[in-house]
Image (spheres, grey):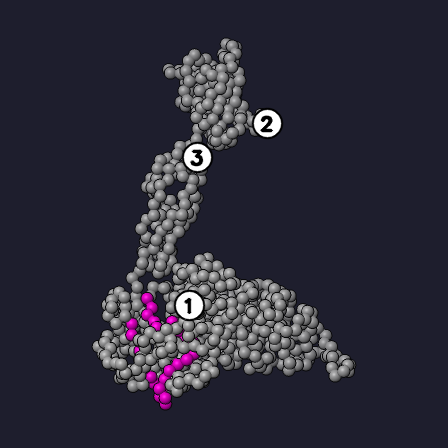
Amino acid sequence: MKSENKKAIAIVIVLAVIIAVSVFTAVIPGIASEPSNTPVTTEPTEEIGIEELQQRVYEQGYNYAVAENWITRLSPEDRKALWGYKHLTAPTEPLPENVRFVSDAPKVKTEKIVSLPSSYDAMALGYVTPVKDQAACGSCWLHGAIADFESAVAIGESNLLDFSEQEVGDCNIWASVGGHNYCEGGNAFMTTNYFTKYGAADEACHPYAATPETCQNCPILKNVDNWRIITGDDGESQITTIKNAILTYGPVYSTIYASDSGFSAYSSGVYEYEGAEETNHAIEIIGWNDSLGAWMIKNSWGTDWGASGPYPGCAWVAYGAANLGDSTSAISGYKIPSDEIFYHDECGWMGHYLGCIGKTTAYGAVRFTPSHDTTLTAVDFWAVDINMEYEISIFDTIKGGPTYYTFSDQLVTAQTGSIDEMGYYSIPLNTPILITSDDDFIVQVKFTTSTHNYPIPIDYCVDPDLNWAGIATSSGESYASCDGSQFEKYGEDGKDIGIRARAEVPNQPPTAIIDSIAPDPAEQVRDNVSFSGHGTDTDGFIVAYNWSSSVDGLLSTAPSFTKPASELSIGTHTITFKVQDDDGAWSTEDTKSLTINSPSAFDTCAGGYPSISGIHNGTITPSQDIIVQKMYTYPCAGTGGHTEYVKIWDENTSWNVTATWNGYADGDWQNITFDSQFTLEGGKTYNYTIRTGSYPQIIHEPSKEVTGGTITCDKFVDANGKTYNNWIPAIRLE
């Protein structure tokens, strides 16, 4: 539907110049002229400059600004590749009499009369994740769906997660089995099928590459169990419907016609386009403003596009413009991926449904055989009409064949209900059912539609680009009936019925993995010890971490951290690491040993006699870095041998340290303490002067290899004035 907005005419200067058969209209930039009925452009075949494009925008009577960006710098062919939304493909060959395609169904929805706010901004409320960049790839359908999922989690948990588009693009059945290149487009039916069977994984596990890669089977963080179809191909006129959906579900997935050059170059203002072309680009609608008459959208072209919009990478788009609002949908429910899902419709629902001629009621059924004991908790199905009624029955026994089948031994009372929107529903069972390994069960759903006679969803697709025939396989376990008493098998050439079942899966404990502890061994004073670990959880995610030492107890509750070795006890530690999952289960411990050694010392060890006090001069060359706080002097037995003064210096610089003995009063006669800690670098030679008192032990050599390096004697002058060159003081620096 075209926009009905009228543009005020302020100043129009018309210069009629007849050149051949052309008419040129001059317009003052920024002032609206009488709107033309011809859109700015329909396909990117004509390359014009930004200034000329801006002039054309004004000539249309529009008031938005354009600017050069990475999209405008693409070739027309590369720009066209960005528009990756694929509508469901209608069959070109006649369908069986009891099968129809979704476009045949009327799109009618009765809206509740509610008071709607005049504006809404989900970004400001914290419900929208940062704008991403799909790059030169037609993956908008993935980005729009992921944005919708991220917003649902943001609303539900006040947590902005970053899900992986790449994993969905590479792992969905159309790609992983059919070889579909996600850069060539897709739609929300494809992503919803993947989200409901599996879910979404962390971006960090499989970062976006803008080109197909190999599925990484990343841990699933969230699984979709409910999805709603808001509009069909008339969404541009369903303004109230979309607003209600946003208020109910949060920001919604939607589509827009994006081939207009003005949209590619959008910078700010309210974008408008009156063409009626089919939409071809997926975005997220994140708000609206009635005073502007516009939707707020989040695009996936980075923040260079729409740089001056409501937020960088976002835009205002006039109500009804560019068919924005067509094919709108919303994730309406999600959960932790703790279910086992039984299904035969591998490709989900792609718009086809089955029914009984002249009847609005039909019965669909599927049979499953569990491989282990479990508990059935919910029944899922694709709802193919608005205002549908359903009745769920679970049976234990199937009889008959090969033409007709009957079900018996009903396991619980039939459960009834109704739905008001098309989409995907997961209906929790009022009474969960214990099911036994290898004992089959049948899920039957009675569907009653309100607008057409084809209520049973079927897995069938005719899009030649998606290779459905090469992917889908018929299970032979789908059944259909018009009266609910006799069923015929349904499904050949890949077809199956879109009814599923969910079963409770016992929580699987997580696994803890120590990645590294280094250095090992570590020196107590000198080193910092880095600890790194992670956890994995096949049916959830990690929420807590615990590191402990057999010697020092709890070390940290972070996945990775660094701790000074001085805070760890000397000796051998058994380090244990464990993780906890979102169900509260702790893993078994991963262990690794760690040795903490005493601080390195420069130690001549003991000397001997003869001894006398005096002044020693010489050099010290440490073999490794040594952190020094004090110096110990070895005394001769029965004496008070000590150092009264020490100076250590670097003769090549001005650096030096000194310390003076405090006397016998403090009781620590042999240690002399420096004012502050310092480091002697390994391999570097330092000079020393040491003045001793009483009778310290002496090493009678001119040079000696000692623990931690080398020490020499240049000159020793004793208390009597006699000089030696082979009297080294017995000391320890530590």
Where does the image place residue 257, in percent across and percent down from the top left? Answer: 56, 75
Q: Which is more N-terminal, label 3 or label 2?
A: 3
Element type at marker 1?
loop
Which of 174 and 574 lies nearest the eye of the viewer? 174
Q: Name the residue that disc number 3 marks.
A: 525
Residue at 43% across / 74% down in the picture? 468
The mark found on residue 652 in the picture is 2
Residue at 66% across / 71% down in the picture? 47
Res 423 visible = no
Magenta extent? 340-368
Which of 531 and 525 lies nearest the eye of the viewer? 531
525 w.r.t. 257: above or below: above
**In which quadrant of the rendered image does the C terminus lie?**
top left
Q: What residue type is labelled 1?
A: Val
384 w.r.t. 199: above or below: below
Q: Which of marks 3 and 1 is in front?
A: 1
Where does the image place residue 207, in percent across and percent down from the top left? Answer: 48, 59
Q: Is 430 on the left or on the right of 34, as rendered?
A: left
